[in-house]
Amino acid sequence: MKFSRRDFAKIVGSAALGATAIPAFGAEQINTEAALVQQNNARKFPSDFMWGSATASYQVEGAFNEDGRSPSIWDTFSKTPGKTVNGATGDVATDHYHRFKEDIALMKNLGVKTYRFSISWSRVFPNGSGAPNPKGLDFYNKLVDELLKNGIQPFATLYHWDLPQILQDKYGGWEGRETAEAFANYAGYAAEKLSDRVKHFFTINEFGAFVELGYRIGIHAPGIKLPPARFNQTRHHAVLGHGLAVQAIRAKAKKDTRVGLAENMTICVPVIETDEHIKAATEATRQVNAQYMTVIQEGKYTDLYLETTGKDAPKFTDADLKAISSPLDFVGINIYTPQYVRADGSKQGFAVVPHPASFPHMISPWLFVGPEALYWGPRHVNKIWGAKEIYITENGCSSSDVPAADGKVYDTDRVMYLRNYLTQLQRATSENIPVKGYFLWSLTDNFEWADGYTNRFGLHYVDYQTQKRTPKLSADFYKQVIATNAVA
Ligand code: GBH
């Protein structure tokens, strides 16, 4: 059925659609109602925008003891009673190790152009360093080849939290400088072997999560609560590991290899978009991310960070700072939720505003719905540090996801979340903030760390009894976004 403007006006009521409401269309015929709505809204992305999706090794692979893989700190932690919901482990997860071809078919059906996966360090170096395990690397060779065969560009993360247990035992994990050095060695090796086909590497995923939760609060692996001085040193070794890895990749990989990171920096959003609050949110972004993103971008810890940590401040050399701030080709940010900030009269010039108890969130209690984070995140990274190429390396949400009688999950809440967040991302690209791509977390439901298999994040529902994958309504929505290169 074809609609003219007049027909459509009759349906929706001509008062709502005055003669000047959609001047761009003139008298031309609009083929369908949906096309009319889309053209009218036209929240288009740049033509070369890279739509993708993301996963991480321990959350999907399973095959925990196959082909020479040694245990990681997440095997140990998840098998310690009381650490994960229902004692869940990643032993099987979504069995991606054996089902990667099926998962790539799901990606192909969505139409994604890119896939962000992570490499399990203990598959490639079961001893953390020393002799590599060719069978471990082989899985990633097969994965990458299958992606390329399907026209999907692989983006590899080198560390998504599954540290070889042996490095925890030997050096206290990231508390030891040796772990940063071992990481660089592994990163250089992996990039050397894969960079003929993988052109983009992320060093480390989310310092702000694995260091804080693993070594300070103790609710993620390795489940330690270090005292402040040792803890701040651990933070320092994590960013050092990143910097040394960047150098190792540059030294070992093919010359056209591009390197960045994937950090869940705190996204400071001005409570109201006025000059004073924007200024406060900008300064807050530098200060609250001082121990990770800011030192990586600026090559210095901020005065406020050094003052606040005082006698417990990390010990470092100029050479450390130089390595940590090695130039990057792009910046990846994982964005889920905003931190509201306002201007105040204090010396630091800003105040963090806690979320009121009634602030809406998704099924994960921490996942407050604030779509503007997807505008302010890339904008800050571009304006504060001049990043010329930005990726949203993760964005997505958890829902309760109960299959309906027909087997489909009608996750209208996830569609709502994505529509609102992507609208704010489009606002950023329309202002020429250089966001090149977006990786939706996650392709499938998977092992959500301490939350086990509760709090599903996937576009595809996984029945963990049968490992059957079923596209949710949100998968259909994302497919439409990709096909039209627009959000509506
Ligand atoms: C990302 O972390 C991870 O990269 C990814 O692996 C994960 O599956 C995904 O997001 C969804 O969570 O239990 O209240 O103390 C996002 C950052 C860090 C946010 C851990 C939630 C736990 C909060 N997350 N944090 S709490």
Image: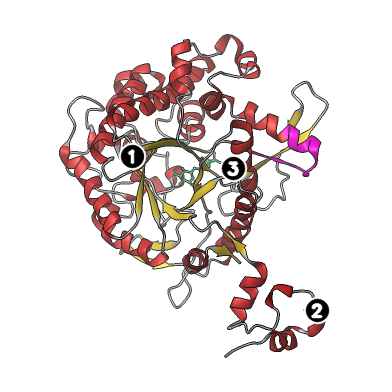
Instruction: Magenta stretch: give its range.
Output: 266-280
Q: Which residue is mark 1?
A: 79
Quadrant in the picture for the N terminus: bottom right
Q: Earlier in the sequence, mark 2 or mark 1?
A: 2
Marks 2 and 1: which is nearer the front? Answer: 2
Q: Secondary structure at mark 3?
A: helix
Amino acid type of the residue that numbered disc 2 sits on in the rendered structure = Gly
Viewer-proximal residue, 97 or 115?
A: 115
Q: Earlier in the sequence, mark 3 or mark 1?
A: 1
360 is higher (above) or lower (below) than 404? above
Classed neighbour count for the residue bearing mark 2: other residues with Cα under 10 Å, few (<14), some (14–19), many (≥20) = few
Viewer-proximal residue, 63 or 36?
A: 36
Marks 3 and 1: which is nearer the front? Answer: 3
**Whole-number angstrom distance, CA of label 3 to CA of label 1:** 38 Å
Amino acid type of the residue that numbered disc 3 sits on in the rendered structure = Pro
Marks 3 and 2: which is nearer the front? Answer: 2
Q: Which residue is mark 3?
A: 378
Residue 130 can be seen in this image: yes
Q: Secondary structure at mark 2?
A: loop
